[in-house]
Image (cartoon, rainbow, N blue to C red):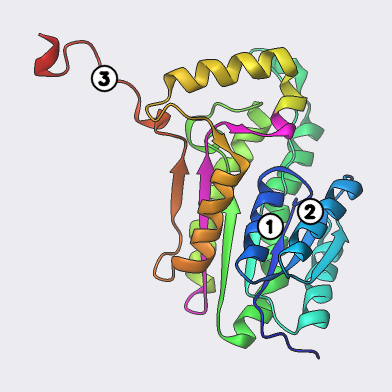
Amino acid sequence: MPSSDKKVAIVTGSATGVGAAAAILLADHGCNVVINYTRSKAEAEETAAACRAKGAETIVFQADVSDDDACQAMAKAAGDKWGRIDYLVNNAARTKFNPYKKLDGVSKQDFLDIYAVNVVGAYQMVRAVVPYMKKQGHGSIVNDSSIGGVTGIASSIPYAAPKAALNLMTKSLAHVLAPEININTVVPGMIQTRWLKGGMGDEQYEAMIKTQGAQLPLKKVATAEDIAAVLVWFLESAHLITGETLIVDSGIHIGTLPPYSSGDSY
């Protein structure tokens, strides 16, 4: 089996958005990278080219992470090429945009399809890379979740519920992956991505960005690069942190001060 001096990262759902930004940042930090996609082949190749421009070797791998055989094959492709897997970013996700009050707008199958990618897929990818990480004695995994898994407010109820499950599963896995492997979850708020824009439509998306930006304590809606930076920090620097869930939402989860909450208001 070949052996690489460079660390190796697998980033699921990395053709565009946060996944692509994470893959490119990891390449910039000296990793070889597996770029994973389901349908967006052209965009995946563009992301791979950006990684190679930073000196990385890449594998572009088409796989639906809800398919366990595909997860195993993706890990094997990395192991066969480079002889190691150091990092896993579970970023692949699925949703169905649906107004919350429209209870008939989602079906049992919608729930199952979303859960299969957002929870089962993440689990299967963890299971696929663990033998490599355990054998080499170290590894780091980070899951990309959603503020919807904390607040219950997201693109739809069938999206929010699995993200809550992903947050909890991170804690469960932290117990069994230690001491060789740490695993954590990043919980982003709203992110400026093509995925969200495509689901909401241009007009609603732009209005939401403007409204959210005004409401956020830090007055900034995150970019894909903002979230990628936190994901990569967990992989590279959070060696004594595991089972943690970190909210990255420009502070909106803290709420707002009520009237007359400080002496300055009286």
* x then y, percent, for residue 253: 40, 31
**Can you say which quadrant of the picture contains the C terminus?**
top left
Around disc 3, counting alpha carbons within 10 Å, would you say few (fewer than 14), some (14 to 19), or many (20 or more)? few
* Residue that mark 3 sits on: 257
Label for residue 47?
2
Q: Residue at x 63, y 75 (%)?
A: 86
Please give the range of residues in magenta.
Answer: 178-196
> Count the marks: how many?
3
* Amino acid of disc 3: Leu
* Marks 1 and 2, how far apart at CA: 7 Å
Q: Residue at x 66, y 46 (%)?
A: 18
Residues under numbered marks 1 and 2 in contact, where contact means CB atoms less than 8 Å apart: yes
Instruction: Choose the circle earlier in sequence order: 1 or 2.
Output: 1
Q: Residue at x 53, y 65 (%)?
A: 235
**Residue 184 seen from this side:** yes
* Marks 1 and 3, how far apart at CA: 39 Å
* x then y, percent, for residue 175: 48, 68
